[in-house]
Image: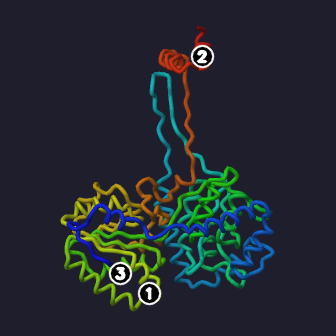
Amino acid sequence: MRTYHTSHLTPSLWRELRTRPWSIDGQVKRSVEEICVNVKRQGDAALREYTRQFDAVSLSDFRVSPSEMITARQRLSHELLEAIETAALNIRAFHAAQLRREQPVETTPGVICWREQRPIEHVGLYVPAGSAPLPSTALMLGVPALLAGCFRVIMCSPPKSDGAIDSTILAAAESIGISEVHKVGGAQAIAAMAYGTESIPKVDKIFGPGNQYVTAAKQFVSSDPDGASIDLLAGPSELLILADEGADAKFVASDLLSQAEHDPNSQVVLITTTQTLAKDVENYLEHLLAELPRKEIASRALERSFTLIVDSLEEGVRRSNDYAPEHLILNIADPERLIPLVSNAGSVFTGQYAPVTAGDYASGTNHTLPTGGMARWFSGVSVESFQKTLTFQRITRNGLQQLAPTLTTLAEAEGLEGHKRAVTARLGK
């Protein structure tokens, strides 16, 4: 990791550092557009061809059968099943607390306004299984979808060469009550859920992370009127750690590697007030990296990462807000003091015993989060992501009389006589 001191950091260099080392390749976009258009036009036939081409397996039926769901669960150890159940319980507890009913507001005597949440009826969840299967993503997406009350929840995940989906993903889906799972991956899975095929129903909104092809497909279908809405465009994982002199360097190095091992395009950042900690972390990184099974991936990510020495923790928070990380760890003595200053981050972990791993799996918060600086304007996935909000109003005759002068004056100002008459007709004027 490169090291910089804030005193030598020019505005142009800081812009360069905070720019993520990742973007969707132009050729990828063109290939994905072709895939999406073909799936839209040819349906299952295109899916079969792309599954043979990309997953090296021929499938006649994409949907996972009930017996396959049972078999997947039987293949897992008791310890792993228990871990899935515990994670699901914690995720459900946190997300259930997000369900709420808003109180009506009387804006004018006789004018009552309120909002109510309604589930998005049909949603599709994409669970990657490329370099590593992600049963945690099945839980993170499935639990809030079911809590929101979505009428139909389907899941797509890439098949292995034997034509089966990874058992941990199926067990996670089964544990929370998702039974409609399809053996389709990549851009073709996104297109299938967006447009619908003979086997896979069209959905209203698509959720889930993925590689460049998946992300480009989500971007494409979300801009097509015939397509579907999406949760967000998630890029490679990223982490920013703000640490003071009391932070354990080994903890910090371990946290940096935990996110660097996701993807060679991931970026991890350390902001600290002490040069000593920065050097100690660098030493631990070198030692711990050698022991990491995914060290080649992590090593490439570290090449794209950096350490920034700042003069104060408050300055560190300002830099973090400007960077807007997916994950933020406040590994400092008194994190509560700085929490009010944090404005841009997908998910925040406070104290020395809160690794991102907890949020990735089982603390209860959601791990589907904005990347690439989009935490400035996007939130992570929640129950609300699977809902839409309707506004209601109930107006009495007296309420309309009270509001009429305002309504008619504004209608006249806008030259909309029909609007005005919709009010005066009711009041006998």
Looking at the image, which is closer to me, 135 or 109?
A: 135
Under circle 3, the secondary element is helix
| Nearer the observer, 264 or 358 | 264
Task: Say which residue appears at 33% left-offset and 74% top-offset.
Answer: 306
Asked if 416 appears above or below 82 in the picture, the reply is: above
Which residue position holds label 1? 295
Name the front one of labels 2 and 3. 2
Q: Which residue is mark 2?
A: 417
Q: How is the image coloured?
A: rainbow
Q: Is residue 275 left or right of residue 378?
A: left
| Comes first in the chain, label 2 or label 1 | 1
Q: Earlier in the sequence, mark 1 or mark 3?
A: 3
Asked if labels 3 and 2 touch by Cβ distance under 8 angstroms, the answer is no
Instruction: Kindly identify the residue that appears in the image at 25 percent across and 59 percent down.
Output: 338
List the residue tagged with mark 3: 254
The amino acid marked with disc number 1 is Lys
Which residue, as the protein is rendered here, is positioned at the far top? 429
User: Residue 105 location, x and y as percent?
Assistant: 46, 32
Question: What amino acid is found at the position of numbered circle 3 in the picture?
Answer: Ser
Q: Are marks 1 and 3 in contact (CB under 8 Å)?
A: no
Viewer-proximal residue among 61 and 96: 61
